Image (tube, rainbow, N blue to C red):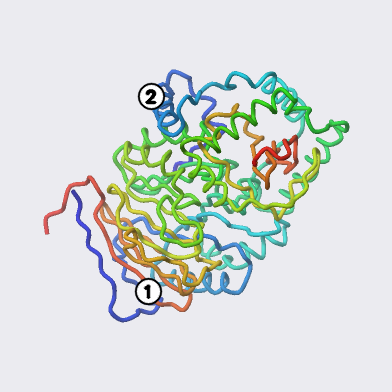
Amino acid sequence: MIQREGRNGARRVNSHRFLPAACVLILLAGAAAAQTPALSKQPPGFGDFTQRVQQYMKLRNALPNQRTTKIPAKIVDRRQSLAEAIREARPAAKQGDIFTPETSEAFLKVIRGTLRGSNAANVRKTIRQGEPVAGVHLTVNGAYPEHLPRTTVPPTLLLRLPRLPDKLAYRIVGHDFVLQDTEARLVVDLIPGALP
Amino acid sequence: MFLICLSRPSAPLSAQDSTLPLKSGSVRFAVIGDMGTGDPPQYQIAQRMLEFHQKFPFTFAIMLGDNIYGGKTPADLQKKFEIPYKPLLDAGVQFYASLGNHDDTNERFYKFFNMNGQQYYSFKKGNVHFFALDSDYLDPKQLVWLEKELANAGTDWKICFFHHPLYSSGAFHGSSTELRTILEPLFLKYGVQVVFAGHEHVYERLKPQKGIYYFTEGASGELRYGNLRKTDLTAAGYDKDRSFLTVEISGDDLSFQAISRTGVTVDSGSFHRPGAEQHAP
């Protein structure tokens, strides 16, 4: 059996080898969402979002990573330790540290534009199909609750947003737009009420 | 051009009766989805899989997401995976997971799921390439990765599996049309022949869509009783009880058999690999 790695492995391939894939991705993005800057790491207008994410990742990369194991308790212990270490490393973290007012505006514009565009019905359907849970109160540095579905982030929306490092993901929880540390299951920042 | 040779038994077969050809050197696997409840029906399906394994010794199983519902404590992973499938694990069956909306991305670090720390990954068995995708988070990076992997897979069988069905007659969710807009062009361009998905808690085999065979198996633990609508998409379906699917690939032929919790074969058949040359009769 040959097993190839995914997310991390993709980074190690020279960019020119991605050229055909990149072309197709641009076409796909064009088909799915016009004027989508599919491959730019940060589409214009998002201010210093990427730099703030990188600052977070500096802190984050200094902490131990998850490793594969057959023992479930180790995964849970590492997740909890990691979350605790992140909280200790950014005790004053608050809403807006990463989604600054300027950045939030850019996200809101893209999110609401996607939800109103020509593909809006499909995008809303994707969100509904991900079974988003309403009425959950999330806080920065707080846990992303265990029982909460990951939710599904519409791919045509992801194509329009700044790319994230492997350990971070965007989530939609009720009406909130959330930046989650996936290994720590921790809320890094959020934009409350981002989704109408 | 490809040959479809489908057969459905007129009388129910018991789970002990395999309709699969059991050819030497074939790739044999089971398909389960939406199973991680930890409730009795999941255990009963696992038991049925074990019984069927005696007659059809599949070497691995692919998991279509929602592997662990609800809590993710160590006890949950044991109750919702290790205990029900222990006899199969002990028999050497490997499980390859994809993630559903109810899963924690940290499941990728769980060795029994063979994800090697990745949210999406590929592996090869015999002449079959498998691509496990994360359909909850189909970001540009994953799409670039998928295209590269598909392009490098050559002319073998290419099978993708993930959580959300691109086509479905399920009344609860239905087809994931936005994902289809993104994924289907890649599948067509690179000759993906078969796609397995879950999410809808029923079993459904779709009529080939643009030449691709789609199966939904989202009832290996959960069930939405009577949830299949009558649509033009369905080739066969089952929404009256839990089920699992077994598959055998030998050369250019794929055979399948779907089995209910009570051991009834609810669907079976075979088809030739789209794009492959026909064998002389």
Along the line of sight, which residue is nearer the eye, B174 or B265? B174
**Residue receiving disc 2:** A20
Is residue B243 positioned above or below A26 on the image? below
Q: In this view, does B270 lie to the left or right of A155?
A: left
The residue at the point 38 percent across, 24 percent down is A20
**Residue receiving disc 1:** B265
Q: In this view, does B3 lie to the left or right of B53?
A: left
Would you call the spot at circle 1 few (<14 residues within 10 Å), some (14-19), or many (20 or more)? many
The residue at the point 48 percent across, 20 percent down is A14
The residue at the point 77 percent across, 32 percent down is A63
The amino acid marked with disc number 2 is Pro
Q: Are marks 2 and 1 on the same chain?
A: no
The residue at the point 49 percent across, 71 percent down is B242
Q: Assign the C terminus of chain A to one quadrant of the image.
A: top right
Q: Assign the N terminus of chain A to one quadrant of the image.
A: top left
Count the marks. Answer: 2
Is residue A135 positioned above or below B137 on the image? below
**Image x and y of residue A174, in percent:** 68, 47
The amino acid marked with disc number 1 is Thr
**Image x and y of residue B51, in percent:** 46, 74
**Image x and y of residue B110, in percent:** 63, 50
User: What subunit carries mark 2?
Assistant: A
Along the line of sight, which residue is nearer the eye, A48 or B157? A48
Would you call the spot at circle 2 few (<14 residues within 10 Å), some (14-19), or many (20 or more)? some
In contact (CB < 8 Å): disc 2 and disc 1: no
Is residue B22 positioned above or below B197 on the image? below
**Image x and y of residue B198, in percent:** 48, 57
